Amino acid sequence: MPLNVRKARIEEAQAIIDLHQDTVRRIHSKDYSPEQIKAWLGRRRLDLTEAMIRDGQYYVGVDEHETLLGFGNIKGNRLFALYVSADHQDRGPLPRTPTLSFPALRRAAKRGLGG
C-alpha cells in the first residue's frame, strides 16, 4: 500500500482527532488505566487541532485513496505525537524507513512522498 506524507488540511482535523482517540482506546489502553486514558483524550479540541494545522505542525500519512493512515505533530525539531491507525499498525512502510528525519519528512510533505 503506497503511503503519501503531506501537510494536514483543516478539513482533516476531526479525522485526526478520531484516529487519535481510536488508537489510544484500542492500542494504548493495554498499558494505561481508564483514568489515564480519559485524561489523555480529554485534552483534544477541534479548535486547537485546526490552529496547529494552520501553523503547519501536523503531517498526515494517507493512502492512494486519501484514507488517513496516521499523523504526526512536529514543532521545530520536536516530535510531539506520531500515531498510526489501529487498523494499520505493524504494516510498512515505517519498518523500511526507520531513519526518516524531521527535515526529510518536511521536504517529503512539501513535494509529496510516494510509497
Image (tube, rainbow, N blue to C red):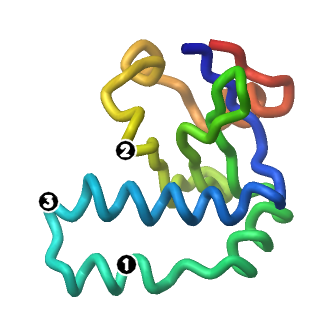
Which quadrant: the C terminus?
A: top right
- Label 3 belongs to which residue? 30
Residue drawn at (61%, 58%), measured in percent from left and top?
Answer: 16
Give the percent coordinates (x, y) of residue 80: 51, 60
With respect to residue 37, does 23 lie above or below?
above
Q: CA distance from mark 1 to mark 3?
A: 14 Å
With respect to residue 19, does 5 lie above or below?
above
Residue drawn at (45%, 44%), measured in percent from left and top?
Answer: 85
Which secondary structure lies at badge 2? helix
Q: CA distance from mark 2 to mark 3?
A: 13 Å
Amino acid type of the residue that numbered disc 3 sits on in the rendered structure: Lys
Quarter where residue 69 is shown: top right
Amino acid type of the residue that numbered disc 2 sits on in the rendered structure: Ala
**Mark 2 or mark 1, earlier in chain:** 1
In the foreground, 60 or 56 = 60
- Label 1 belongs to which residue? 40
Amino acid type of the residue that numbered disc 1 sits on in the rendered structure: Trp
